[in-house]
Image (cartoon, rainbow, N blue to C red):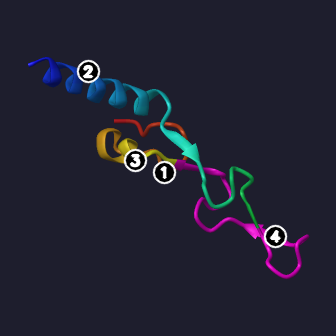
Amino acid sequence: MVAVIVIAIVAVSYIVSTRIHPLRKCPTCNMSGRHFGGIYKGSYRRCRRCAGRGQLDRVGTRVFGGGTSHTGVFPKK
């Protein structure tokens, strides 16, 4: 019984956390928004994964909150 209560508290905490902090840093560009070239190290382009923003939605944001389209602002309902 205690395990069920602990799991419920952790689940609610995670849902609240995704509502407060919906974004995470992009693992490809490490929040720089730039992808550097392999041959010419000084050249770069926008990161394809995050479209140059440096941020991505967390996993639970789209599942529980509807997603932010990587803007950090929830859509109006």
> What is the spatial separation of the Cα atoms under label 2 and label 3, in whole angstroms?
18 Å
Nearer the observer: mark 1 or 3; the answer is: 3
Outermost residue, left direction?
1
Q: Measuring from the top left, give residue 1's x and y in whole percent.
A: 8, 19
Q: Measuring from the top left, give residue 5's x and y in whole percent.
A: 17, 19
Judging from the image, what secondary structure is the residue with disc 3 in?
A: helix
Classify 4 as above or below 47: above
> What is the spatial separation of the Cα atoms under label 3 and label 4, in whole angstroms?
28 Å
Front residue of 56/30: it is: 30
Kind of residue sitting beneath label 4: Tyr
Kind of residue sitting beneath label 1: Ser
Residue bearing the label numbered 3: 59
Kind of residue sitting beneath label 2: Ile
Residue bearing the label numbered 2: 9
Q: What's drawn in magenta, residue-wise? A: 36-56
Please tell me which residue is depicted at 14% across the width and 17% down the height of the picture.
2
